[in-house]
Image: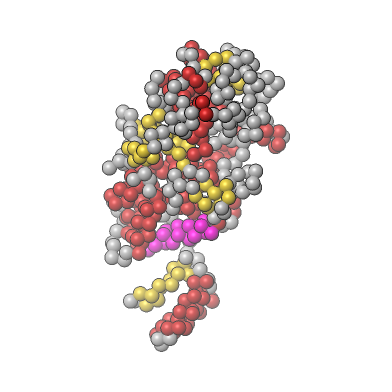
Amino acid sequence: MSLSLYDTASRKVQIVAATNGTVTMYCCGPTVYRDAHVGNMRTFLLSDLVRRVLEMHGNKVELIQNITDVGHMSEDHDSQDKMLAQAITEKKDPFEIARKYEARFHKDLLQLNIKPAQHYPRASESIELMQAMIAQLIVLGFAYIGEDASVYFDAQSFASYGAISGNRLDALKPGHRYEYTEDGAKRFHADWALWKSSGARSEMIWDSPWGPGFPGWHIECSAMSLHYLQGHVNLHVGGIDLRFPHHENERAQSNAITGNESVDLWLHGEHLLFEGRKMSKSSGNVVLLQEVIERGFDPLAVRLCFLENRYRSQMDLTWSAIEAADATVKRWRKKIASWGIGEITEDYAFLEIVDNDLDTPRAIQYLRTIEKDETLSDRSSRFLFADQLLGLELNRLEAITPLSDEQTQLLNLRLKARNEKLWKESDELRIKLEETGLEIKDTKDGQAWNWR
């Protein structure tokens, strides 16, 4: 058994390969100028799920996730770095801003039960790595120094540009998203900056062989992935919005250095909508994990919501879905405690489902079927085996909320109605009980209830 995933470059589902017994993974991390919203966290959870499946199969996984704290330009095509813009807004040093939001990012990962990467290299602490790669690209003829003293990658020098996104250089228009205008300093409009001359900028700049400046956004991932993963990446993970130009440019830079395909499989998670609209700061539709917690929901309810949707399908998250998932997680924990926690054994049927392009919605449906099958004696074992992937902490004991006087009275009245075969009255009392948050079940041994 082995995990297969959809490779964006080949447009095919492929088996995830290992190199010398280890699966090397690189996941594009956050730009730490603000809190990561739940849409961002969906991508980071994708990486975690893949890692957990690989480890369930006995693989060693080496995961690197970068921290972007410099060089990421705003999307409105001005030359303002996002870190510097936020520093001005909050009236703080830009590196203070970076460390603040980086710490909050790690807190969110912990609350979503996402396993930490082996290393989180920061862009600001990897400048020498990037400069060494840029120098090598110049020597190899893939980069040049522009008239503005910035260094650019020569897109036309890389013959297979566009393999991930399907974009052709001759069809690209000037000024595409995430690329800023250089006023004629570039040889070709689709070339991109590897190193930007500082110009009038006075903060977050470094000395270089080409003069003071700062790195372009794309070069950091090439430099870090090749350095920390010994020159080859088995699996590269990111959101679908990074497919172009970020991952397209990253592939060109990395392959130009290694002389071959530096990444075996490119994995992308789809967009997240919230209440039917794209989640973005500009539309005021950003939801943070902390807001979920403040509403009284377990943050792992968000994790379950993500699991109930295919990673490469657009998803519409809602507060009602989070509420329902919160109730499901708590119900499962109580049921597992009531079933008894025994020895955990492998569930090959569950593994077969998730191995098929990480089909988590079908995996969740499989567990719902197991939950209802009272003939099975190993329900607890199956759930807890699956939870090694799901990460919902299903072995956590939930605090038992005592019944209110009203609920106790209604249960007694319903029991009396059933004993007297007053079925209409019994049904009416069931509805009232369910409105208070209870789940009522009639068994051969009598009336039973659970919290929803």
Q: Does the magenta stretch include residue 332?
A: yes
Residue at figure coordinates x 43%, y 30% from the top left: 163
User: Is residue 190 in view from this perspective?
Assistant: yes
Q: From the viewer's side, name the closer residue of 361 and 443.
A: 361
Q: From the viewer's side, name the closer residue of 250 and 168.
A: 168
User: Is residue 127 in view from this perspective?
Assistant: no
* Span highlighted in magenta in the image: 320-338
Residue 96 location, x and y as percent? 64, 32
Locate the N terminus and report the quarter of the image it occupies.
top left
Q: How is the image coloured?
A: secondary structure
Q: Is residue 361 left or right of residue 156?
A: left
Q: Is residue 151 magenta?
A: no
Residue 208 sits above or below residue 374 on the image: above
Residue that protrudes farthest toward the bottom in the picture? 420
Q: Secondary structure of the magenta portion, mostly? A: helix
Residue 356 location, x and y as percent? 34, 45
Residue at figure coordinates x 54%, y 15% from the top left: 144
